[in-house]
Image (cartoon, rainbow, N blue to C red):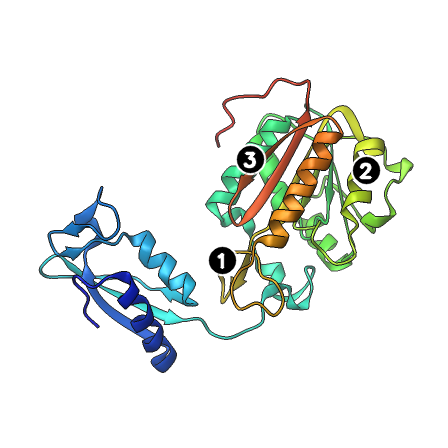
Amino acid sequence: MTFTDEPLSEVLPAVRRLLDAQGEAVLDVPDPDLGLGLYAGERSPAGRHRSWQTWADLAELLGAHLLTPERLPGGRVRVRLRAHTPRPDPDAQGYGAGEWARVDKLEDPVFLFTLVEALRRVGPPPGGRVLALGVNGGRELGALALAFPEREFKVLGVDLEPQALERARERHPAGDFRVLDVNTLPRPELGHFDLVLALSLLQSPGVRTDALLAALVRHHLTPGGGLVLGFPNARYRDGTLSYGARVRNFARPDLSLLMADVTDARRRLQKYGFKVFVTGKYEVLVTAIPAGSKTPEGLEF
């Protein structure tokens, strides 16, 4: 299919029909590099401009991979989209096994950047204690060394999946990893922590967020301690990240539950006396530090 001046309202349904029929769409379009600085839809030397981000978003929206493009004569490029191969989402087998064990969220640049920023915002002291709830295979704990290359921490990671904890022990031999249900907190024998990290946990079935936050703040945080809470806003489709929280029986993302959960966590933490920051994209991070502390600067990774 060749597109030059057609509006996106014509391009999108045409590409969707082709993907539905053939599983792949090959498009000859104006070279996005010739329109740098233009807004989408403005005229470039070869036709209506659309950035590479537009084509990437279109592929994601239609459930397709954006393949390597080919440059053509006359200021045009050939864009290929290939439909995702149908297969279960990684969490279909649970977060501790199967496909989910392959996922490395630190390979998402936005998550990597915002997680390091959030950790530095809390700023646990050298030798401080870190509690990682729902630690799974421990991949995200690698961000601690990236955020604080000169510091070491005493890490306690807990999860319900023994297999996941085995992988965490292999990745972080110095850490302490235990099978524990977060709904049993507070547990006085665990002590107090300078940082509590809970990624992709609070929306899990059975987790009582209000009781968990109360237990953490009242019984397991040091006076200067902080929290980083992660709320998923994506799913993995055929190995790629697809934006937007999914609700069962909804064909498209619905952010209402995500927004409600993030707003509720933010409100509760503010009532407990924290300054709260909300950042991120595919995983929304809620970071809480004591209200009386100075907001740190220079957090960029």
| Residue, disc 1 | 241
Residue at 55% across / 50% down in the picture? 105
Query: Where 245 sits versus 186, above or below?
Result: below
| Rendering coords of residue 211 (x, y %) | 82, 43
**Precedes in sequence: disc 2 or disc 3:** 3
Tell me the CA gap for discs 2 and 3.
25 Å
| Residue, disc 3 | 116
Query: What kind of element bears circle 2?
Result: helix
**Precedes in sequence: disc 1 or disc 3:** 3
Left or right: 151 in relation to 166? left
Residue at 71% across / 33% down in the picture? 269
Check contact, mark 2 vs mark 3: CB within 8 A.
Answer: no
Amino acid found under the numbered disc labelled 1: Leu
Of labels 2 and 1, the one closer to you: 2
| Rendering coords of residue 254 (x, y %) | 56, 58
Tell me the CA gap for discs 1 and 3.
20 Å
Q: Residues within 10 Å of mark 2 (few under 14, many from 20)?
A: some
Amino acid found under the numbered disc labelled 2: Ala
| Residue, disc 2 | 214
| Rendering coords of residue 143 (x, y %) | 58, 39
Towards the viewer: 8 or 296: 8
Query: What kind of element bears circle 1?
Result: strand
Amino acid found under the numbered disc labelled 3: Val
Query: Where 231 sits versus 127, above or below?
Result: below
Check contact, mark 1 vs mark 3: CB within 8 A.
Answer: no
Query: What kind of element bears circle 3?
Result: helix
Residue lying furthest bottom in this view? 21
